Amino acid sequence: MHLVQTAYHSRSRLGSDHRVMLQGLRDILSIARDRNGATGVTGYLLYDRDLFAQVLEGPRAAVEAVMKSIRADKRHDTVLVLGHRPVLTRDFGAWSMGGGTRSIEQQEVYLRHGFSQALDPIRLSLPKLVALAGDLARLESQRRKIMA
């Protein structure tokens, strides 16, 4: 199977009400996990203030279908693809869709990647986002093992 990896960022239209924003993010992740599991797409979604940043990977047609859906989703504004490349293996194979909002526990990871403040879309690139999301996914995996 030929795999591709795509990264993008977009502005959120979830609003400024924290509860509404959290519910919107939960809805996005829930739908993505169900849909992606069925189509072979994996990835990781970061949400920081009003910015979504996401890495998607899987079969080309499936990733392109997800991107088409994201572009049409009213919760996203100004979707900008950071890059698209073929890959031999998945970086997020264990995640039908991992992700969440920036938290105190994750702050050190963000700092290691040069983001002391909110994610700056001008400084994001495909490799930089894959590295950041990968470290956040590993941190989340470690946290889950401890809690189990």
Image (tube, rainbow, N blue to C red):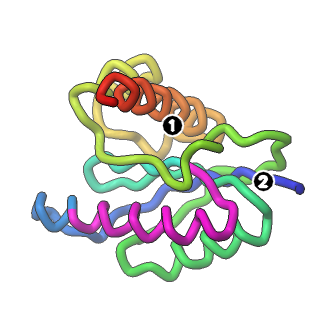
Quarter of the figure that contains the C terminus:
top left
- Spot occupied by residue 137 in the image (x, y as percentages of width and height): 48, 34
Distance Cα–Cα, label 2 vs label 1: 16 Å
x, y percentage for residue 104? 21, 28
Q: Is residue 72 left or right of residue 127?
A: left
Picture quarter containing residue 15? bottom left
Q: Is residue 41 magenta?
A: yes
Q: Residue at x 29, y 28 (%)?
A: 147
Q: Tell me if residue 103 comes above or below residue 116 in the rendering.
A: below
Q: Main secondary structure of the magenta part?
A: helix
Q: Which of 138 and 107 is in front in this view?
A: 138
What residue is at 67 percent from the left and 69 percent from the top?
A: 39
Identity of the residue drawn at 35% across and 27% down? 143
Pointer 1: what residue?
133
Using the image as rendered, state which of residue 148 and residue 30 is in the foreground: 148
Place residue 56 in its image quadrant: bottom right
Q: Do the residues labelled 2 and 1 touch (CB within 8 Å)?
A: no
Which residue occupies the extreme front position in the image?
A: 148
Q: Residue drawn at (65%, 44%), measured in percent from left and top?
A: 93
**Mark earlier in primary sequence (2, 1):** 2
Q: Where is residue 16 in the image (x, y as percent from the top left)?
A: 14, 62
Quadrant of image for the N terminus: bottom right
Q: What stretch is highlighted in magenta?
A: 23-43
Q: Which residue lies furthest to the right in this view?
A: 1
Give the residue number, with chain letter if any, for mark 2. 4
Q: Along the line of sight, which residue is nearer the eye, 86 or 28?
A: 28
Query: Along the horizontal axis of the image, is 46 left or right of 124?
Result: left
